Amino acid sequence: MKAASISGRMGISREKIFSWIIMRQQTDRRLYPLFRMVSSISGRFINWEETIPMFSRVEFEINSECNRKCGYCPNSTHERKHKGLMDMKLFRKCIDEMSRIKYRGMISYHFYGEPLLDPRLGEFVEYASGKCPGSRSFIFTNGDFLDVKKFRDLASRGVSHFIVTQHDGALNGVMKKTMSALKADERKMIEIKYLRDDCLINRGGSVASVKNNADNADSSKTPCMLPCINMIITVNGNVLPCCNDFFEKQSMGNVSEKGIIEIWNSDKFRRFRSDLRAGKRSEYSPCSECDYNGYTFQQLPENLKRERTRKVA
């Protein structure tokens, strides 16, 4: 049966079906065979440049520092190219432009740093939520500083979801106290993710000691849709198409010099997206060294959350 007829009967666009499979397979290895099939046929049904004309996830690196040096993270062995704090004016410039297009996707406040180390985090969230009311602010954190007071302050300013990765295999002391003190409806805003359940990758070759533990498939020619939906803005304003570009090798422009939409629609970025969709990883670094299977974590609807993410009730 054709994808169009299936989606028509279900009342769901075929683009959403393909996108769900593409995004879900990152954390559910059982879906990888289906993903491989979809990636080989999706080009017949979808013009990705038209179907996904605008990014749906923006990551702002509001600060470059992290309090941990995990061995499976490039922070453990390398220094960030640009360090420090993002200028609030630069952040507001981007958000103002996103507001004008009525941006409704995800906004997060990290790259390889810990966002809760930045005392301005609440200001960033409040400004983004006010200017882009249809967006969703996510906090990705190790949870070391997420006490009850901080949680409620950020939630009141507009954070809709907290993704807390526990790198030691169990809840840390701060998170134990926080989860026990929160009300039931508050706890639903927190996802606890354990390292043992995560898919480790070499971060574009920047972590030589790590190998993709999802499967043994060759990713060197796998199409990658990450640049079709994702945008990272570093502390100094560089726009990157991938969260695995730790060394900022593929900067598409700088938001202090050009508008965020202008950069997204630039010939350079469009060509990069086209080549990655076609599986031409070998033409770019760090893509040529990356062992990831080609797609990104993307926030799913509540009823499609990842099975393997553990929650603490």
Image: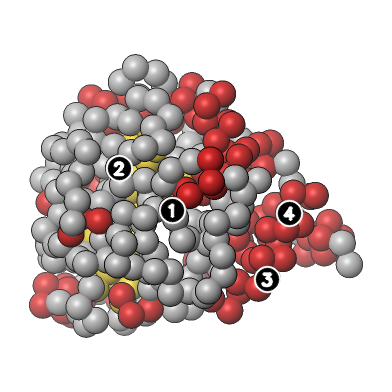
Mark 2 residue type? Phe
Label 2: element kind: loop
Q: Is residue 59 left or right of residue 223?
A: left
The residue mark sitting in front, 2 or 1, is: 1
Question: Is residue 230 something that shows in the picture?
Answer: yes
Q: Which of 290 and 37 lies nearest the eye of the viewer?
A: 290
Question: Residue at the location (43% across, 74% down)?
Answer: 213
The residue mark sitting in front, 1 or 3, is: 1
Can you identify the residue that label 3 sits on?
Answer: 34
Label 4: element kind: helix
Mark 4 residue type? Ser
Question: Residue at the location (25% across, 56% down)?
Answer: 74
Q: Is residue 232 left or right of residue 110?
A: right
Can you identify the residue that label 2 sits on?
Answer: 247
Label ID, residue 289: 1
Label 3: element kind: helix
CB under 8 Å between callouts 1 and 3?
no
The residue mark sitting in front, 2 or 3, is: 2
Mark pair 2, 3: CA separation = 32 Å
**Which corner quadrant holds the C terminus?**
bottom left
Label ID, residue 80: none
Can you identify the residue that label 4 sits on?
Answer: 42
Label 1: element kind: helix
